[in-house]
Amino acid sequence: MAQVVDPAVLALEREGPRLEFGEVRFHPAYAEAGRAVWASGLLAAPPLESAALFYLLAHAGEAGHACPVACTAGLIRALRAHGSPALQERFLPPLLEPDYDRCQRGAQFLTEIQGGSDVGANRTRAVRAGAAWRISGEKWFCSVADADQFLVTARPEGAPPGTRGIGCFLVPRRTGDGRPNGFRLRRLKDKLGTRALATGEIEFAGAQAYPIGALEDGFRIAAGVVLNTSRWLNALGSAGLMRRAYLEASSFAAHRTAFGQRLADFPLVRENLAVMRVEEAAALASTLAVTDLVDSPDPREATCFRILVSANKFVTALAGTHVARRGIEALGGNGTVEDFSPLPRLLRDSLVFESWEGTHNVLCAQVLRDLARLDALEAVLGRLAGADGRVDSALSRLEPRLRRCLEEPEWAALHGRRQVWLLVRALQAASLVRDGASEALVELLLRRELTPGWEAADDAGYPGLVEAVLREESGVEAAG
Ligand SMILES: Cc1cc2nc3c(=O)[nH]c(=O)nc-3n(C[C@H](O)[C@H](O)[C@H](O)COP(=O)(O)OP(=O)(O)OC[C@H]3O[C@@H](n4cnc5c(N)ncnc54)[C@H](O)[C@@H]3O)c2cc1C
C-alpha cells in the first residue's frame, strides 16, 4: 500500500480535487492510491486488522483516502447496527466491495454553518414523502464530497429542538435513474491540510433520504456509532503520522553532520528524538487499547470504549501536531520544504485531525458528561489500574480531581480538560506496560507527564533515560 500511496500523495497535494460542472475531479493518482487502499481489505477486516492497515496508511500522510475509509467504516457500522434489513441489503454490499472501481464510499455530514460542535443546532430539515423522506438544507463541511452514500443529520418535521430532535438519514448520491439526488455541491474548501481530499459545501433541496434506525435515536447513532468509529480511526491516523515523523527525523539526524558531529550526537537532538519516540509509541499503545474495546458485547467495556475513544482522540491528535512539529525542527530548514520530506504535509494534516471528529474542548466535555451520566468513573479507572504501581499512584492522585469534575461542572468547565489529558496519559503508560514496551519508554512518559513537579534538569537519571529510549531503535545509537 505504501509503495503506491506514498508517491501518489505528492501529486495529489500539488493538484488537489477540483469542481467541474458540479462533479469532483481528481488527479489520476487519487484513484491509483484508492485502489491500493481498498484492495488491502481494510473495510471488511476485523477491528485489529483494520487498525493495523489504517496505521500503515497514515505513515504516508492522509493521502486523501484515510477520511473516506473512516467515513465508509462509520456508515457500515451504522447500517449494520441500526439499518433496516431492506436498507442493509441495498446499501451495505457496495460499501464492503474491495474493488475501488466498483465500490461505493460513504460520507458523513453533520456540521452546518452555524456550528459543528453544537449538532443540536442543526437546521437541515427532513420531510416525509411516502416511504422515503426528503432532506433540505445546507451542510458546511462535507468531506468525501464525491462519495456515493451520504449519512446526513436532519431534523424531521415536528421533532423537538436540540439533539433529541435529530434524525440520521442515508442519502444516496444518485436517484434510481442515475441523476444527482437533490443536492448541489456549491464549492470545495481550500484547506490547510488533508488537501488531497475533497471537502465541500453542499445544499440539499428535497434529496431522497432513508432513516437509519429510529428517528429519535438519530443523534445517538451519529455520535455513538459514526463519530466514535471516526475518532478511533483518527487516533490511528495520528499515531501513524507520528511514527513516520519519528522515522524521518531519526534517519536525518543519524546521517546529517553539523560542526563536525552527527546531529544525532547532540544532547538536545537526542532528547527531541526520544520524546518523539515516546509519543508515537504511547499513541499507538493507547489506541490499540481502545481497539480492544471496539464492538465489545460487554456493556461495561462498551461504556469504556465510548469514553476512552473520545479522550484518546483528543490526546493523540494534539500529540500528532507536536510530534510533526518536532520532526520539522529536527530537519532544520529542510524540514519546511514540501518535496524534501513528508513532514510539512504531516503537520498540516495533523492540524486538521485536531478539529475533525470533534475539537479538544468539546471531546473533553463529552468525556466528563459521559463519565457522570453513565456512572462510569470506576469502570474506566478499573480498566487502567493494576498494570503498574506507578500508574496506580498517578490514578489515585487523579481520581479526586475527576470526581470533582463530575460533581462541580463549573469547576470542570475550566479544569476538566487537563484531567482528561492525564487520564489518557495514564492509559498510555498502562498500555505500554501491558504491551511489554521497554521500561525506558514507560519511565520517560511517566516522568514527563505523570510526575508532579518533575524537572529534567534536577533529574540525574534523565540523560540515561533518553539514551535507553533511543538505544532500542537502530540508527540513533550514541556515537563511540
Ligand atoms: C478538513 C475538515 C473536514 C471536515 N469534514 C467534515 C465532514 O465531513 N462532516 C462534518 O460533519 N464535519 C466536518 N468537519 C467539521 C468539523 O467536524 C468541525 O469543524 C468541528 O466539529 C468543530 O466545529 P466548528 O468548526 O463549527 O467549530 P465550533 O463548534 O464553532 O468551535 C470553535 C471553537 O470553540 C470551542 N468550543 C465550542 N463549544 C465549546 C464548549 N462547549 N466548551 C468549550 N469550547 C467550545 C471548540 O473547541 C473550538 O475550539 C470538517 C472539518 C475540517 C477542518
Image (cartoon, grey):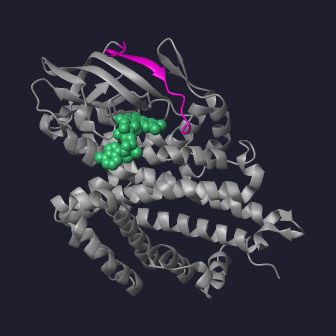
Task: Tell me where residue 39 appears, x and y as whole percent.
Answer: 51, 42
Residue at image position (28%, 75%) is 399
Image position of 260 (left or right of 440): right
| Res. 228 in view | no
Task: Tell me where residue 182 appears, x and y as whole percent.
Answer: 31, 14
Image quadrant in which you'd find residue 413:
bottom left
Task: Tell me where residue 128 appears, x and y as whole percent.
Answer: 13, 20
Ligand 1 located in image quadrant: top left
| Vertical relation: 378 (above or below) 461 | above
Which quarter of the rendered picture does the C terminus lie within? bottom right
Task: Tell me where residue 445 appears, x and y as whole percent.
Answer: 51, 74
The kind of secondary structure the magenta stretch mainly shows is loop
Image position of 187 (left or right of 44): right
Looking at the rendering, the stretch of residues picked out in magenta corresponds to: 178-194
Image quadrant in which you'd find residue 34:
top right
Image quadrant in which you'd find residue 440:
bottom right
Residue at image position (55%, 44%) is 349
Residue 65, magenta (yes or no): no
Residue at image position (86%, 70%) is 261
Count the marks: how many?
Answer: 0
> Residue 116 or 5: which is nearer the viewer?
116
| Res. 438 in view | yes
Residue 186, magenta (yes or no): yes
Residue at image position (40%, 55%) is 313
Image position of 326 (left or right of 291): right
Residue situated furthest right in the rendering: 260
